[in-house]
């Protein structure tokens, strides 16, 4: 009886391993196209880091705003699509994420070396974001949307503290993940995508 039980158990284990093997191979085949795209993106980003980051940041933030406004139009009666807002976010993603943020992340690597994701996330969320990213965001997007300089300054003063602290719970773990698991070539893609999720 014990021998028969072991035979049945062995057959069940072999059957389970076969199913696992089939499932894993299927998942790998499904993931293969995405791995190829990822490898190609990393290759292009390595060869042309700023051009790639500019295209990535601009495209994703454009899609992000179109998504947010499309959702708003479904819940707000007579919603009027604001193309200047979309343009402002496209420009911010292109020029700030693509040039300034990309350069800052290079500086992190040069100054702090590889690893140290908690320290980099802390510096990014407590220094870079409130004192450089947010002012640039308000001025760039505000001017493109038609606000006066005084209007932008007033809005920044009113909203700076809340904007600097309210989303910290979201962005600190996101930036830790970014510096822990993303390569320098994919960091702008990651933060632009997380911004899309955050804004939507």
Image (tube, rainbow, N blue to C red):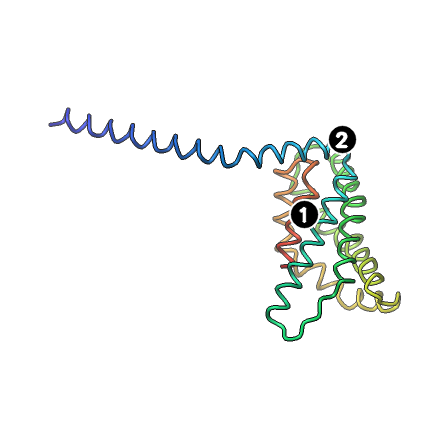
Q: Residue at x 64, y 38 (%)?
A: 182
When asked about the image quadrant of residue 26, the answer is top left
Q: Which residue is mark 2?
A: 47
Q: Residues within 10 Å of mark 1 (few under 14, many from 20)?
A: some
What is the x, y in percent for residue 200? 62, 59
Give above or below for 77 relative to 190: below
When asked about the image quadrant of residue 178, the answer is top right
Front-lying residue, 118 or 10: 10
Picture disc at residue 191: 1
At mark 2, the secondary structure is: helix
Q: In the picture, which quadrant includes the N terminus?
A: top left
Give the residue furthest to the left.
1
Q: Residue at x 76, y 62 (%)?
A: 83
Q: Residue at x 43, y 33 (%)?
A: 24
Mark 1 and mark 2 in contact? Answer it, CB < 8 Å: no
Sequence-wise, the earlier of marks 1 and 2 is 2
- In the displayed structure, does residue 169 sit left or right of residue 86? left
Give above or below for 91 relative to 80: above
At mark 1, the secondary structure is: helix
What is the x, y in percent for residue 27? 46, 36
Disc count in the image? 2
Front-lying residue, 53 or 78: 78
């Amino acid at each position: 009886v014990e021998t028969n039980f072991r035979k049945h158990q062995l057959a069940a284990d072999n059957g389970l391993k076969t199913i696992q093997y089939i499932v894993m191979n299927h998942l790998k085949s499904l993931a293969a196209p995405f791995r190829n795209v990822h490898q190609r993106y990393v290759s292009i980003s390595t060869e042309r880091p700023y051009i790639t980051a500019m295209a990535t940041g601009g495209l994703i933030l454009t899609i992000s705003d179109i998504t947010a406004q499309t959702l708003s139009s479904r819940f707000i009666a007579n919603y009027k699509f604001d193309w200047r807002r979309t343009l402002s976010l496209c420009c911010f993603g292109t020029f700030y994420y693509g040039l300034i943020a990309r350069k800052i992340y290079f500086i992190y690597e040069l100054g702090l070396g590889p690893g140290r994701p908690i320290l980099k996330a802390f510096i990014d969320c407590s220094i870079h974001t409130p004192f450089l990213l947010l002012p640039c965001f308000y001025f760039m997007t505000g001017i493109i949307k038609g606000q006066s300089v005084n209007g932008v300054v007033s809005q920044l003063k009113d909203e700076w503290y809340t904007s600097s602290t309210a989303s910290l719970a979201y962005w600190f773990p996101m930036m830790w993940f970014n510096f822990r698991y993303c390569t320098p070539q994919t960091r702008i893609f990651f933060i632009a995508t997380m911004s899309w999720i955050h804004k939507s």
